[in-house]
Image: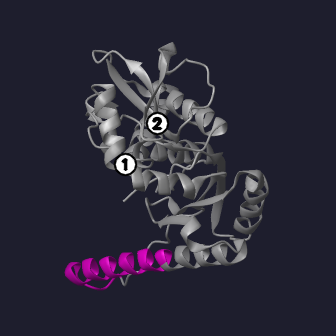
């Protein structure tokens, strides 16, 4: 299990709210970032993205 | 002209700078006493990650100026008429939600497990089949133990906060690292006091690291049925 630091957790909580909370109105278009529909990005997927980012940082550092 | 929706509020609109995402015009569309704050957008331009944070800043600005319901980021309408039709269909529920969040803000608490679950102690002499089954059982037991511990922490938080349950939302075990993700809806003028209270209560839990965020616009409590 990778430990989340508080900064990651804060960002993930905010992103989760932006993408998964709030009023859902009909008629919404599918809007995507890098081919992934924002509407369906969940916290777990965002966690995965942070892990990928950290691994890339570790590779750059080594 | 596509509209990227940010927040719903009751008419009349607050006086706000007419600057939306990426400096594009921020517009107000109104029907039946309700209105939608949105950015006038070129449909050929894709939203990107920084737009999500700018959407959040816009929602914060709107909610600071008047009671508002944040709209999920990425919600777009082809025309203003389509947006207004959508509001009209949900007018009663939107008014009820606006009344629910009036004068309130959201404070969030995340509890992160300090340690990974301890590996199961298995007998070395058993065969591979039994070993597999015992490992599975131990993993299930550890997960269930953590779930129960997370639920107990939530209960303690709710009791200590002395807050009504409809004003609390939570999930447990959303990932291996996250024990609890919790949000409370509190009067805006008490938000910082409540935030400090959450920090004090959560600091007593030795097995998790608390992260408190907000006050934020009431994202979690803006849902309508």
Quadrant (top left, top right, bottom left, bottom right) of the N terminus of chain B: top left
Q: Main secondary structure of the magenta part?
A: helix
Residue A44 in sight from this viewpoint: yes
Numbered mark located on residue A42 in the image: 1
Please tell me if label 1 and label 2 are on a single chain.
no
Q: Is residue B67 above or below residue B143?
A: above
Residue annotated with mark 2:
B35
Residue B213 x, y percent position in the rendering: 65, 49
Q: Secondary structure at mark 1?
A: loop
Percent of width and height locating residue B133: 26, 81
Residue at point 63% right, 26% down? B15
Q: Is residue B14 magenta?
A: no
Give the letter of the chain under mark 1.
Answer: A
Asked if residue B220 lies left or right of residue B194, the reply is left
Outermost residue toward the front in this view: B32
For the magenta stretch, what is the residue range? B124-147
Protein chain holding label 2: B
The location of residue B67, given as percent across then percent down, is 60, 44
């Amino acid at each position: 299990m990778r430990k989340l630091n508080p900064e990651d957790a804060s960002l993930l909580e905010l992103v989760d709210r932006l993408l998964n909370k709030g009023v859902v109105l009909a008629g919404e278009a599918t809007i995507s970032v890098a081919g992934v529909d924002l509407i369906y990005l969940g916290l777990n997927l965002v966690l995965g993205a942070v892990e990928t980012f950290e691994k890339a940082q570790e590779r750059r550092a080594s | 002209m596509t509209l990227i929706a940010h927040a719903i509020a009751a008419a009349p609109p607050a006086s706000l700078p007419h600057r939306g995402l990426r400096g594009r015009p921020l517009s107000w569309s109104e029907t039946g006493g309700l209105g939608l704050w949105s950015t006038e957008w070129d449909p050929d331009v894709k939203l990107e990650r920084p737009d999500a944070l700018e959407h959040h800043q816009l929602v914060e600005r709107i909610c600071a100026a008047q009671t508002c319901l944040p709209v999920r980021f990425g919600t777009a309408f082809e025309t203003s008429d389509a947006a207004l039709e959508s509001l009209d269909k949900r007018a009663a529920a939107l008014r009820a939600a606006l009344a629910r969040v009036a004068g309130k803000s959201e404070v969030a608490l995340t509890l992160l497990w300090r340690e990974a679950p301890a590996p199961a102690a298995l007998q070395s002499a058993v065969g591979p089949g039994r070993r597999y089954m015992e490992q599975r059982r131990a993993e299930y037991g550890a997960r269930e133990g953590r779930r129960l511990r997370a639920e107990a922490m939530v209960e303690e938080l709710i009791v200590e906060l002395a807050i009504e349950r409809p004003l609390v939302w939570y999930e447990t075990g959303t990932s291996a690292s996250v024990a609890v993700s919790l949000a409370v809806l509190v009067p805006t003028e008490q938000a910082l006091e409540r935030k400090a209270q959450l920090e004090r209560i959560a600091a007593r839990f030795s097995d998790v690291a608390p992260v408190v965020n907000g006050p934020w616009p009431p994202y979690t409590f803006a849902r309508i049925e």
